[in-house]
Image (cartoon, helix red, strand yellow):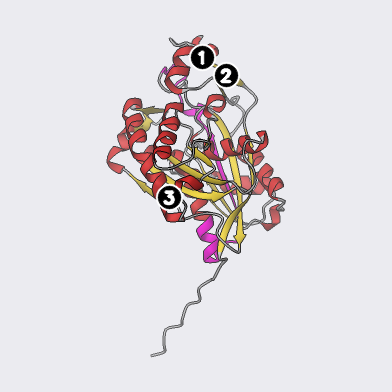
Amino acid sequence: MTDRPRLRQTTGAAGARILGFGSHQPDKVVTNDDLSQLMDTNDQWIRDRVGIIERRFAEKDELLVDFAVAAGTAALADAGVEPSEVDTVILPNCTMPSQIPNAAAQVAARIGIPSPGAFDLNAACAGFCYGLGLASDLIRAGSAKKVLVIGAEKLTDWIEPTDRANAIIFADGAGAAVVGAAGEPGIGPVVWGSAGDLVDLIYMREHKFIYQEGQSVFRWATTQIAPIALRALEAAGVQPSEVDVLVPHQANLRIVESIAKKLRAKGAREDLLVADDIRYSGNTSSASIPLALDHMRRAGTVKSGDVVLAVGFGAGLSYAGQVFVLP
């Protein structure tokens, strides 16, 4: 009997960091007044309830894959990384029209990334944070060298147009980040979890339309997400006062403000920058965090070296957060 062979293990980088961001939204702007022509609502009611002023809706012939290609291409350009350098593509989303084929392989081929590991990830609105955590761990384990993470959604395919509770919230778009090796960590450990006993708060009704118990989700998010954000800070060894930018999933402006208030009560600075991209982009699920950050970078609101605390949460109920440094 021969000895069993000893298996090799890869070794990776000491840390991982974000190298660049990119985003894309469809051109069609939909205001609250536009929606009031379709349902019993008005601009002030929507602003007071969720904080949204306008959002972007795709045309019927625009696809989730199209958004992802545009955002991914922009992120690679921002990072100064050639498509040939990317070996892994992770595409968080929950709104592909079919489960097969996945979006990641299609997007990689269209961008010109040769033969990468490519897979979709469904953690709903927490998807980007899940994907970023996986990218960092793959690089540190030696399984990947450069990873493209793209959160992309076409939520309007899954919304009843006259649904007063949901059609005012959701929108379309994509946000992407390129992740590479670093001599020291630029991305903190992901802190993630789920509340599977609450899956019936957000689900696909009749396999056609997204439905959620809005008030129950609001109560859960405003009580449970700030503690998760604090756990992410602790895991990264960062104090609340050291955070420059807070980017919660853009679900509802009142939820965003509640999380920020609770973090300030725990020591976050009064001048903490808080993403409020939901006002002009709506809720874009797994795209919302990178989309918000790319908009803030382009506006000059944030700068290279800023310490970011991101936390995503949504259907599942899934949640995840981490600390990272802006490129």
Q: Amino acid at mark 3?
A: Ala
Point out the stretch of residues depicted in magenta: 136-164
Question: Looking at the picture, which amino acid does disc 2 mark?
Answer: Val
Q: How far apart are the alpha carbons under marks 1 and 3?
A: 38 Å
Mark 1 and mark 3 lie on one chain; the one further toward the N terminus is 1
Give the structural element (helix, strand or loop) at label 2: strand
Q: Can residue 146 be seen here?
A: no
Residue 327 location (% of width, % of height): 64, 49
> What residue is disc 3 on?
232
Neighbourhood count class around disc 1 (C-alpha, 10 Å): few under 14, some 14–19, many 20 upward: many
Residue that numbered label 1 is attached to: 35
Tell me, yes or no, whether the two marked residues, 1 and 3, touch with CB atoms within 8 Å: no
Upstream in sequence: badge 2 or badge 1: 2
Report the Cα–Cα distance between label 2 and label 3.
35 Å
- Estimate the x, y position of residue 83 in percent, counting from the top left: 69, 52
Q: Nearer the viewer, residue 59 or 301?
A: 301
